[in-house]
Image: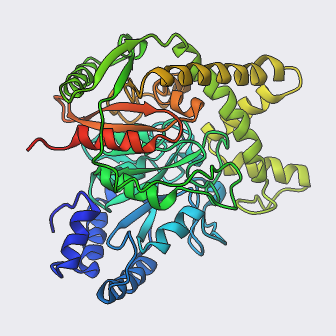
Amino acid sequence: MKKYTSLTEIQGELAQRQLTLKEIIAYYFEQITKNKHLNAFNEVFFDSASKQAEKVQEKIDKGSAGKLAGMVIGIKDNICYLDHKVSASSKMLDHFVSPYSSTVVERLLAEDAIIIGRLNCDEFAMGGSNETSFYGTVKNAADEERVAGGSSGGSAVAVQADMCLATLGTDTGGSVRQPAAFCGAIGFKPTYGRISRYGVIAYASSFDQVGTLTSSVSDAALLLEVLAGADEHDSTLSSLPVPSYTANLSQNGKKKIAVLKETIENDVLDQETKEAILIALEKLKGQGHEISYVSFDLLDYLVPTYYVLTTAEASSNLSRYDGVHYGYRNTQAQSLNQLYKVSRAEGFGEEVKRRIMLGTFVLSAGYYDAYYQKAQKVRRLIREKVEKLLEEYDMLVSPVAPTPAFKIGENVQDPLVMYMADIYTVLASLAGIPAVALPLGNNKEGLPLSIQLMTKHFNEQGLLSLSYHFLKKDK
Ligand code: GLN
């Protein structure tokens, strides 16, 4: 079977009866088996996915199928799906079965998507290389000695190696965009408050957002249309109406685009990535958009602010894993205190423990003002600066990551090197604005390159339309 890159193609063939859902699902199962060594899936939902395929095929035959009929999608292993395991790639939740479904899963199923399995990720979504997973590293299909990116590494490789049509990831500080960039996929993170977090295992609640990894902008638009919008279970959600992103994809006026100068003229940026971005900017100019360079002098503050705030939130969110309520429990402990301590010491991996300790430190009485509160103030400044820029410009541009996919093992021993690699993605997360990673082809070694576009709160439509036109093949 050929590689499908959009649901429109699949639905066209399903409607013509050139293809059945049984064939599609069999194809993806085969692809998963063939690519098992890449370690993208923590579990394949053979039974429930096959049953759903039969059910949806009947609906297609009757003409009553939903918008996502024909879509085979994988979900990151931190998104809850009733009666299915969910582990956040942690020993802490190994074997844990979800007693309910997240809102995103319910919305996917309500529109007849088929959920094919749960995807490997960094433990509790903490990481940028998928090397902190309890289930092992995910390999990049473009070069198996290289990382897939993270934390949604499995979600990226599943799309890259055609193991399903699309995937969901979560993005707290870049975890959808950066792995998408490393694997040549389109990684879309909406505005904070656009998609429900209900049933998504929390890392840093004022940052976490569900996002999509796809091969086409139209699929990103369609998924957003299905997933976005108010939910009584998540009070941080906006009640703004959800536009028909797909219907409006082709509208596209001339945009004022600002390139964040310090992100491009920066020693950390890989030369070929820079060249690819400059070519992309020429293309955007050729498409009639106005390109300017603006200064963003807060760049050095982004990573520290992000890590103070997210570790603080993580230390609070992860306090629920105490060996008592659910998850891993040490059975030899002699006292309650020991039970907490040993269960947490054994259930969490090194990176998660590092962050819990860091977060506990910045929240502690003597350091709260100096770190946590200060970081909150800096976050406000960053957000205001971004909002101001976006009053004048429609879009902001930066790289997604300083380098293409790095080698497995290259950065994992040095957390600071790993954290610094988030320099370009955490801006949109701190400001809560939507952002997308778009593929720019490969470098000389065959590794995917990427560009990031960002826009104002709730302007997903503008971002999707621009991305659509930018990536559209010239006739
Ligand atoms: N790499 C970043 C971190 O480690 C982003 C993670 C994410 O977005 N979940 O926190």
Q: Position of residue 462 (x, y in %)?
A: 39, 40
Q: Position of residue 430 (x, y in %)?
A: 59, 30
Give above or below for 475 relative to 369: below
The quarter of the rendering in which ligand 1 is drawn is top right
Q: How many marks?
A: 0
Viewer-proximal residue, 76 or 437? 437
* Residue under the image location 30 percent in, 45 percent down: 251
Viewer-proximal residue, 311 or 196? 196
Question: Would residue 375 be found to the left or right of residue 398 on screen?
Answer: right
Residue 1 at least partly seen? yes
Asked where in the image residue 104 lies, by quadrant, the reply is bottom right
Question: Would residue 370 be found to the left or right of residue 197 on screen?
Answer: right
Give above or below for 11 relative to 381: below
The N terminus is located in which quarter?
Answer: bottom left
* Residue under the image location 82 percent in, 19 percent down: 369
* Residue under the image location 64 percent in, 18 percent down: 381
Asked where in the image residue 231 lies, by quadrant, the reply is bottom right
